[in-house]
Image: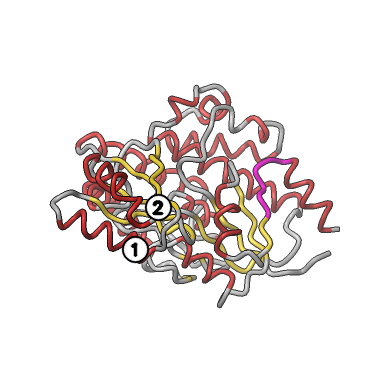
Amino acid sequence: MSQLPIGLVFPGQGTQKEGMGAPWQDTPSWELTAEVSAATGEDLPELLLRVPGEQLRRTDLAQLTVFTVAVIAHAEAVRTGALDGPVVACAGHSLGEYAALTAAGALTVQAAAALVAARGRAMREAALAREGTMGVLVGAPLDQVEALVAEVREGGLDVWVANINAPGQTVVSGAPKGIAELTELAPCIAARMLKLQVGGAFHSPYMAPAAQALRTALEGAAFADTQVPVVANVDAVPYTDAAGWAERATRQLTSPVRWEESVRTLTGPLGCRRLVELGPGRTLAGLIRRISPETGTVPADSPEALRAQLVSAR
């Protein structure tokens, strides 16, 4: 069996799809849907099995369903022994940070689910109150994207860098007119804009009302010290202590997700030689291959994928 140090990574909003729970329905860890339902008042089996994909694009439902699949996948990975080495760190992309904190022992599933529900509601309400959107600039280095964003903002339009995902892939967030202006100017830095189907300008100052609402829920949450470090989105720094997560999670809503730096923290000082993506889709595995091609990536988006990982490890 390989004993390479493993980092666990968890995806965020945008990876949801209709029927996303079906692969996990017959696993023992499916019982976690009852815990999440009890904590949030939502019918998770219904959301994960039967709700149309268009409805799942709603911010609060998208976040809750992605979180639930991620914690189920993690529970199954632990239960089946599919992780072929010591887990030394965790990280999650935006919403995925809550699954990472759960996996590391900072939060119970029910406590994290309640926070995810509060976060999703707050973000949806902020987006309804102030129209915003997002897009991803592909093909240009970060410094050029940052300079272009600053230029557009100096021209009076609201735009900000929202996610620093990988070399040549930077997500921007802001007013529809600001994103439209960036789309027109993208060719001047040899980039192209891909619009994202999202309900608001996330990870920007437009989410300040959501951050204020979430802070109350976070301050009432019982965080614990973690068993392994969790790399925070806001600064790409690993933390094991309970103190500070309420502040970091609040700040995350209006700050860029520093995913590229986070992966470099996982594969550098934390020593991860394999990163296992637990949850729906394989988005993070693709980003990791661009950030750190020499690092093994394992997408575990179904029980079959976990079994394949288990077999390959033996």
Provide residue 60's location: percent of width, then percent of height. Answer: 38, 36
> Is residue 192 found inside the magenta-colored segment of the image?
no
Crowding around mark 2 (Cα neighbors within 10 Å: few <14, some 14 to 19, many 20+) is many
Please name the residue shown 50% across and 22% down the image. Answer: 52
Chain part drawn in magenta: 298-303
Q: Residue at x 27, y 56 (%)?
A: 149
Along the horizontal axis of the image, is 206 left or right of 93? left
In the picture, measured across the screen, residue 28 lies left or right of residue 62, that is right
Q: Are the residues flagged by discs 2 and 1 in contact, CB closer than 8 Å?
A: yes
* Residue type pointed to by label 1: Gln
Q: Nearer the viewer, residue 2 or 168?
A: 168
Q: Is residue 75 above or below residue 222?
A: above
- The chosen color scheme is secondary structure
Q: Which residue is tagged 1?
A: 144
- The residue identified by callout 2 is 191
- Across and down, in percent, residue 55 comes to 43, 25
Q: Secondary structure at mark 1?
A: helix
Q: Identify the secondary structure beneath mark 2.
A: loop
Q: Amino acid at mark 2?
A: Ala
* Relative depth, front residue between 30 and 21: 21
Query: Residue furthest toward the right?
Result: 314
**Horizontal placement of 151 versus 60: left or right?**
left
